[in-house]
Image (spheres, coloured by chain):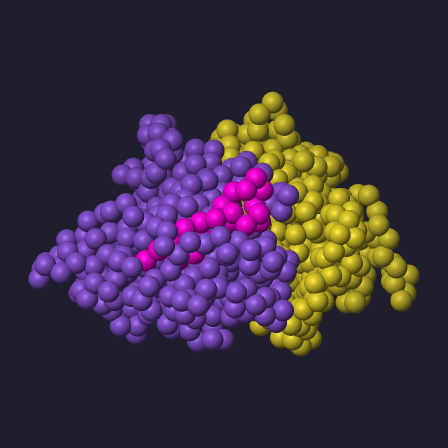
Chain colours: A yellow, B purple
Amino acid sequence: MYKIIQTDEGVVAANGFFADGVSAGLKKENAKDMAFIFSEAECEIASAFTTNKMAAAPIKHFKAKGMFKSNFILINSKNANAMTGAAGVEDIDEILATLPQNVINPIMSSTGVIGVRIPKQKIIQGAKLFDLSKKEPHNAAKAIMTTDTFSKEISVRVELEDGSVFNMGAMAKGAGMINPAMATMLCFITTDANVDRAQMQEILDEVIVTTFNSVSVDGDTSTNDTVLLLSNSTSGAYDEIAFKEALYAIMHFLALEMVRDGEGATKLVTYRVSGAKDDKEAQKVAKALSDSLLVKTALFGEDPNWGRIASTVGASGAECNEETLSISFNEHCVYDKGRLLFDAEMEEKTAKVMKLDRFDISCDLGVANGKFTAYGCDLGYEYVKINADYRT
Amino acid sequence: MYKIIQTDEGVVAANGFFADGVSAGLKKENAKDMAFIFSEAECEIASAFTTNKMAAAPIKHFKAKGMFKSNFILINSKNANAMTGAAGVEDIDEILATLPQNVINPIMSSTGVIGVRIPKQKIIQGAKLFDLSKKEPHNAAKAIMTTDTFSKEISVRVELEDGSVFNMGAMAKGAGMINPAMATMLCFITTDANVDRAQMQEILDEVIVTTFNSVSVDGDTSTNDTVLLLSNSTSGAYDEIAFKEALYAIMHFLALEMVRDGEGATKLVTYRVSGAKDDKEAQKVAKALSDSLLVKTALFGEDPNWGRIASTVGASGAECNEETLSISFNEHCVYDKGRLLFDAEMEEKTAKVMKLDRFDISCDLGVANGKFTAYGCDLGYEYVKINADYRT
């Protein structure tokens, strides 16, 4: 057996990793807006990117190089370098060419406004402020924030049965445009586990489905979504099951942190869909629920309006019918296979559930055995405020 | 040739149709909440209903009877009679059984809250207030409103080349849950044109695609959407082309009225998508744009944030790429096949466009010749307010 113990070292928890954040004057008031992650030893890399066909320049740059080994990631917030064409990719090459010589195959990652050329000179000057011997994970995590209201970090130490140990740490940014199928989120995970690239990629692909790809803030999928998982193998330790579980713990935690910090969100809701024709149909229903404006505004209004849940299930396209459907708020079943259970007493009970920061909405379609769990949040005035004047 | 002349008689414009609205105490403060449409002569009926699998009792009732001839529609607001199972359908039978004897195969149509049994006695008492000799189309149109802020009516007289004349009139309710593929909307169209049922259904199916199915308020599809088109043939006049054009004029007008009155909406935006692989892909892009929360909140903020348009096009799943895409706000092209044209001057010009009540956003994907036009609105604080406490 193995033990997974939470630590507090963020993205530098693994041996030989360094990180810091600096201000390059991209954000107002000298807020940190550039970060790096550096490993002395070269790393194997697994990756996942947005499905958006307007993928941003950093993603095109990464894919064009086919970079599976690197020891450096340069990250900036405030400008996404998206819709900037070949020039945007050339800008990245020019920026990365100015980095110190001990940097191998550097990677760039960006988030922020779309459709504006990246301020190359500011970024180049900003990168000169990096001190690659620094271990300041909190600074790095702050520097990559956009509309996030808090930084998102986690790390774990994994102790294997044979006494060997590896570490894994991560930072992420989220907030808006979070949607199943990857959305505006950046996540950087580092580890010193001794894992080979192909296996690391396979595990990442598996774990992402039930973590980042099962959360939704507003149903939009961004141009810049990126997950990079770097291993420098320096611990020499590895166990497949333990590695997968540690990665799941980290990605699941960060995915929920993103929803909890969804723009203007006040509630984190878990949608448990079961009894669907298959898992894919359950996922379709869960996504429809977490994306529905009518459901999200009802959550914000703390209104146990189960009729909107039923209507959204029906509109999802999944096989379902009102004779076999059941709906619960936490443990309270409000509709059971055609029976209307939402009397005054039930309304009082479920209204209390709706006032919680975190609760479950369960839908059993009663068709077959497909199931999926998704996470969403409410939508209130703050979301409108944040997004009505994002650029200003 | 023929002439189509707008008239002001709403749903009783056609010969032999009667309508009125009454208060049955379903809404607060004695507001009108029940309406009828009655024709002395029996009518042929064409219909279109929601694609939601939780279709409400009135729709199940209609489909079970296979009613293609009727002379009476009873409509109530405030309660949707949805998720009410077999009992909900039986309630309709009991209500309709109390109507006067000159009513043939009556139809019921409902809108309002989901998941509550319909107040049968109130409705039966309300129906007793109907005076079938009344022609009060404005009362009827008001009675079917829910969160609509204005009633939606239109009528036309069609003069054919041979001197014969037919009339067509309609009323509708819209507001929230408006989405391509039919959404919470009710629309009742009456005509005295001498058209047979099969042809009328075929024409309705064709016209609905570019009218009701191309508008979106919030991307939700309701349990109760209904379009009923009744013809009593009493004019003896008919011409297929003129009929189709008149029906298009009426449905297009009402579709745009619904978007204009979308919950909290302040702007009506026309999304013109061209250059897609085919019309279906163009429709997918147009729907993605009109449904995107990030686009809708940018509209509300009057922010010409074209990057969100580009990102939404890219996330729609349609074939596209940044080298061939072009985006315009009215006549101002802000992005042209890779060229960034959004300088300070352009920002000023497009910011002016965004302040208009009505404008166009055009996206040419530059892939092939598919095209589709959709209509949407902005999303602001009012939408949240209306939907956060709809039931109260």
For image coordinates 46% across by 64% down, the residue present is: B100
For image coordinates 49% across by 43% down, the residue present is: B263
Find residue A263 and report its horizontal and vertical position in percent.
62, 40
Apparent side of residue A260 relative to residue B321 in the rendered image (left or right): right
Whether A272 is drawn above or below B69: the answer is: above
Residue at the farthest top position: A29
Quarter holding residue A311: bottom right
Whether B61 is drawn above or below A74: the answer is: below
Find residue A166 and report its horizontal and vertical position in percent.
81, 56
Q: Which residues are magenta?
A: B17-37
Quarter holding residue B262: top left
Residue B347: tell me if it is visible: no
Foreground: B94 or B326?
B94
Q: Is residue A246 magenta?
A: no
Quarter holding residue A329: bottom right
Find residue B392 and report its horizontal and vertical position in percent.
64, 43
Whether A158 is drawn above or below A240: the answer is: above
Foreground: B293 or A6?
B293
Indicate the quadrant containing the N terminus of chain B: top left, top right, bottom left or bottom right: bottom left
Foreground: A357 or A46?
A357
Residue B359: tell me if it is visible: yes
Q: How many marks?
A: 0
Apparent side of residue A369 relative to residue B113 in the rendered image (left or right): right
For image coordinates 89% across by 67% down, the residue present is: A1
For image coordinates 70% across by 34% down, the residue present is: A139
Find residue B375 and report its horizontal and vertical position in percent.
38, 49
